[in-house]
C-alpha cells in the first residue's frame, strides 16, 4: 500500500470520526432541551355545572420520573362567551400518583359535583389496581375558587 493511500485513509477516518462526534453532539444537545418541554398531560375527568362552572381533572406526567404524575383540578367560569380558568389546585402531592394507573381504565373512582353555590366536589382516584382507590378528597367551589372541604 502506498504512503499516499495510507494518509488518505487516515484522513477519511478522522473526518468521519469528527462528523460523527459533531452529529452526536447535536443530537445530545437536542435531547437535553427536551427536558424543558411541557409535561405530557391527559384530561381524566370533566364536569359542567350548568352555565356556572366547568371542572376538569388533568393528569400531568412528571418530567423527572416517567412513572410519576400530578393531578390538577381546574375550575373555569363563563367569560365573554367562553370558559376562562378561575382557579386550580393540585390533588394530592406533586408527583404523588402513578402515571399508568391514573391514565388507564378505571382511573377515576369518584368525581362528584353539584350545581349549588358553594358547589361540593369529591375526588377519589386509582392508586394502583392492587391498592385500589385513594381516600376521597373533598373540595368546595365558591365564586369560582377552590377551597378544601
Image (cartoon, rainbow, N blue to C red):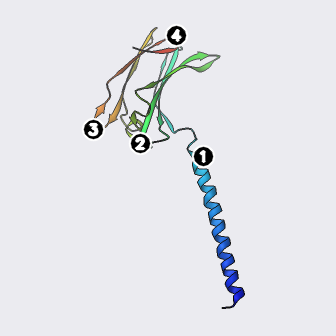
Q: Which residue sits furthest right?
A: 4
Q: Is residue 9 above or below residue 25?
A: below
State if disc 4 and disc 1 touch (CB < 8 Å). Answer: no
- Identify the residue at horizontal 66%, vertical 66% (top origin): 19
Mark 2 to mark 4 CA distance (whole Å)? 35 Å
Whichever of callouts 1 and 4 sits on the residue coming sooner in the sequence is 1
Residue 67 position, x and y percent, is: 41, 42
Assign a secondary structure to mark 4.
Answer: loop
Nearer the observer: mark 1 or 2; the answer is 1
Q: Is residue 75 visible?
A: no
- Identify the residue at horizontal 68%, vertical 71% (top origin): 15
In-front residue for pair 87/34 = 34
Nearer the observer: mark 1 or 4; the answer is 1
Which residue, given by chain and number where applicable, does mark 2 sit on?
67
Nearer the observer: mark 1 or 3; the answer is 1
Assign a secondary structure to mark 1.
Answer: helix
Which residue, given by chain and number where applicable, does mark 4 sit on?
143
- Identify the residue at horizontal 59%, vertical 54% (top origin): 28
Which residue, given by chain and number where applicable, does mark 1 sit on?
33
Nearer the observer: mark 2 or 4; the answer is 2
Mark 4 to mark 3 CA distance (whole Å)? 38 Å
Q: Quadrant of the N terminus?
A: bottom right
Query: Which numbered circle lies on residue 73?
Result: none
In-front residue for pair 16/84 = 16
Q: Is residue 109 above or below residue 12?
A: above
When asked about the image quadrant of residue 24, the answer is bottom right
Which residue, given by chain and number where applicable, does mark 3 sit on?
130
Q: Is residue 133 above or below residue 137?
A: below
Whichever of callouts 3 and 2 sits on the residue coming sooner in the sequence is 2
Mark 1 to mark 2 CA distance (whole Å)? 20 Å
Whichever of callouts 2 and 4 sits on the residue coming sooner in the sequence is 2
State if disc 4 and disc 2 touch (CB < 8 Å). Answer: no
Amino acid at each position: 500500500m502506498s504512503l499516499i493511500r495510507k494518509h488518505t485513509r487516515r484522513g477519511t477516518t478522522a473526518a468521519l470520526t469528527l462528523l460523527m462526534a459533531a452529529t452526536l453532539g447535536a443530537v445530545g444537545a437536542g435531547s437535553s432541551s427536551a427536558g424543558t418541554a411541557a409535561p405530557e398531560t391527559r384530561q381524566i375527568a370533566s364536569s359542567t355545572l350548568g352555565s356556572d362552572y366547568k371542572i376538569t381533572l388533568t393528569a400531568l406526567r412528571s418530567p423527572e420520573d416517567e412513572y410519576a404524575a400530578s393531578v390538577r383540578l381546574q375550575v373555569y367560569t363563563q367569560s365573554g362567551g367562553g370558559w376562562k380558568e378561575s382557579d386550580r389546585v393540585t390533588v394530592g402531592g406533586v408527583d404523588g400518583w402513578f402515571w399508568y394507573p391514573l391514565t388507564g381504565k378505571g382511573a377515576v373512582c369518584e368525581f362528584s359535583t353539584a350545581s349549588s353555590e358553594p358547589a361540593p366536589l369529591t375526588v377519589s382516584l386509582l392508586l394502583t389496581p392492587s391498592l385500589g382507590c385513594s381516600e376521597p378528597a373533598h373540595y368546595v367551589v365558591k365564586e369560582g375558587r377552590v377551597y378544601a372541604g
